[in-house]
Image (cartoon, grey):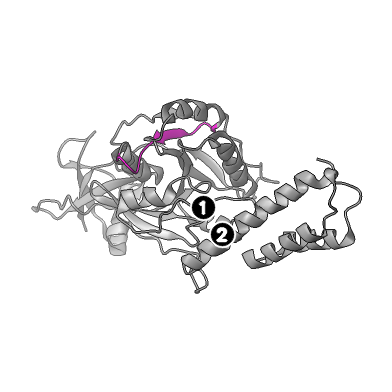
Amino acid sequence: MEMPANLTPAYLAAERRYREAQTLEEKLEALEEMLATIPKHKGTDKMQADIKRRISRTKDAILNAKKAGARHRVSYTVRREGAGQVALVGPANAGKSALLRALSGAQPEVADYPFTTRSPQPGMVAWENVNVQVIDLPPFDPELSPPWLAGSIHAADALAVVLSLGSDDLLHEAEDTFGLLRRQNTWLRPGEPPVSHHLEPSAVGRVPLPAPPVPPHEDAPRPKTWSAVVVASKLDAPGAEARLELLTEVCPALPIVAVSAETGAGLDDLKAWLFGLLEKIRVYTKAPGKKPDLSAPFVVPRGATLLDVAEAVHKDFVANLKSARVWGDGTFDGQLVPKDYVVRDGDIIELRA
């Protein structure tokens, strides 16, 4: 919409302060001044309504921040634990906090008003014999998201984009969410389930994934991409199945896993996907003549070699390794393998120094 020509200098100054504001309180003060100084005539009716809407949302966000104790000093980074870290991202009221509680037993605040989450909230999700750290982050909003949010997203190993099948605005929320990720230079690639499982997603998005920008020259680092899955939450909501079909029309070409934190539907499959997003495998070790401990695997990246496993066990093994035997798929029991052998999920390795 073209801006009316008769906006006053006082309004324009207040609008500039709003754009430059660093806190919610500063944003609210500037918005209220914008409303007070905007010329009151038919040509600004829609602008006035938009300012009032933003004032209401900002007041709600300030109130919720106070309820959550956000005035206290908080850390916006979470120390990585378990096999890796997956961040939950998405719009307000998508069900991220309820999902974290259902998956991990963590107790983030869950409420039916937006912006309940004001700082990173971690939880450990157990899948088989490994743990995945899942981080609930504040919702995406072009005006109210905290400035540190992009950094917390980029610090994660993988992303789960949470969208609500109970929302009438689902399609707009999906488009806004993926648009904000692109503007934050967060480039996605399709996640996969664990290599030992052949899980099918509930659906797959149909919009081509945008490609990261081409580096300016050959020696420049390539943009990072994050393994990602779309979590279609609130599968128990009325009309959820129809909305799931519509979601595929606007969603990038990522796997979509439909779940319900309320009924538990889809949560077991989602736990497997969360580990799969990390693009890692589990390897076990044993001492000669002993049985392996199958409850405590070493977790290494897909494509790791025998030497990578030896280093994970103890750095001295790398220099002193003489031989290794492997039990697992694709080998016969106790097969001697070279140091560059690429390990597989579930391999049992006997290292001899």
- Residue sitting at x 53%, y 41%: 188
Percent coordinates x, y for residue 158 in the rendering: 45, 48
Question: How many labels, in total?
Answer: 2
Q: Residue furthest front?
A: 41
Relative to 172, 116 lies left or right: left
Say if mark 2 contacts mark 1, CB within 8 Å: yes
Q: What is the secondary structure assignment of the residue under circle 2?
A: helix
Relative to 180, 197 lies left or right: left
Query: Label for residue 61?
Result: 2
Instruction: For residue 307, say whether it is visible.
Output: no
- Residue sitting at x 50%, y 38%: 167
77 or 296, which lies in front? Answer: 77
57 or 343, which lies in front? Answer: 57
Magenta-highlighted residues: 251-264
Look at mark 1 in the image and give the residue it sits on.
114
Magenta: main secondary structure: loop
Relative to 29, 135 lies left or right: left
The amino acid sitting under disc 2 is: Ala
Q: Residue 14 magenta-drawn?
A: no
